Image (cartoon, rainbow, N blue to C red):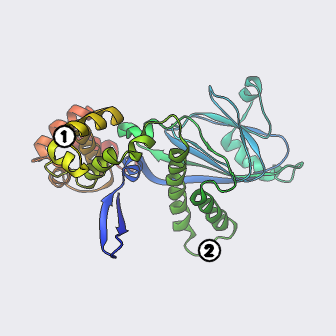
Amino acid sequence: MGVSCLTPSGDTLTSMDVVSDAISAVRLGRPSFNRARVGGSWCVRLPPYEGAGFHVIMEGSCWLLPDGGSPVSLGTGDTVLLPHGNGHVLASSPVDAAEAEKAVPFEQWLDESEARAGAGTDHVEMLCGKYRLDRSHVHPLMAELPKVVHLPNRAGSHPELRAAIGLLGGELDVRRPGSYTALPSLLDLLLVYMIRSWMAESTTGSWPGVLGDEVTAAALRALHTDPAALWTNERLAAEAGVSRPTLARRFTAMVGRPPMAYLTWWRLTFAATLLRDTPDTLASIARRVGYGSPYALSHAFSRQFGTTPGRYRESRSPGR
């Protein structure tokens, strides 16, 4: 996913962003969401999902109980991302395992929530949604996200995320011309900001450190910007401004694989994304990702994904 940026002189540069690429490699179609407003006592179950779930608490408070995890208290303005699609329970108050077993299925609860909106006090208004993800080639940055990414609404924290939530609320309160386009775009932006906010706060993940290391980040940026280039360890080290042994040592230690091994993996992952999302021919895709022929790409692709490019494309086509 290309990102255009301006240099201080005003010239436009095109560079690639590892976080954007990590998201675009797995994201499918448009996000879906439901808005619910409910009062009184309630407990609802959301089953495991082949994607990522999210909740934005627009008003009030509630509790989230992830399957196999600890309860999380959610307040007004809080955002929570479940990047691996784990099943979970949402409830008006803390619940134990026995109560969680009796939770109402989400779809049934949605049908009932309008009728329950006027019941009792302590109303909760929330946005519950899902991002469809293709988990056949997940970038390690996405893979290392925790089961629950809770981003509390604290004063001064994550202003971009707060702004996105505000814009979402405005679009939901008053449907304006263009809302059909604006809402999915804002939800896509929300995903970027949630991951960016997690990276800013993470004390356990390795990828925030990877992208914060100027040498490794420069090498990754080069590989993502032009994966088809005739990269060598020497050329990549020059791009990063260090010696070849220094790059090899730092990159391998931080990323978990040597630079050329990462390049091969990314080329094939990028090819899978192009097969899924574009009508481009295999020859065109081979050129874009740095393979000399469709045959060479097909052979490498089959080795990594266990299927041919044609079968992969067919299995990911709309309606499958």
Q: Position of residue 103 (x, y in %)?
A: 73, 33
- SS label for mark 2: loop
Q: Amino acid at mark 1?
A: Arg
Q: Which residue is mark 2?
A: 176
Res 320 visible: no
- Which residue is under mark 1? 244
Q: Residue at x 26, y 56 (%)?
A: 279
In what quadrant of the picture does the C terminus appear? Answer: top left
Query: What amino acid type should be assigned to the residue bearing mark 2?
Result: Arg
Q: CA distance from mark 2 to mark 1?
A: 55 Å
For the residue carrying disc 2, how many other residues have a C-alpha within 10 Å: few (<14), some (14-19), or many (20+)? few
Q: Position of residue 32 (x, y in %)?
A: 55, 53
Q: Mark 2 against mark 1, which lies toward the viewer?
A: 1
* Residue 204 % position (x, y): 51, 34
Above or below for 287 versus 72: below
Residue 160 appears left or right of 1: right
Where disc 1 sits, the SS reads helix
- 140 or 205, which is in the foreground? 205
Quarter of the image for the N terminus: give it. bottom left
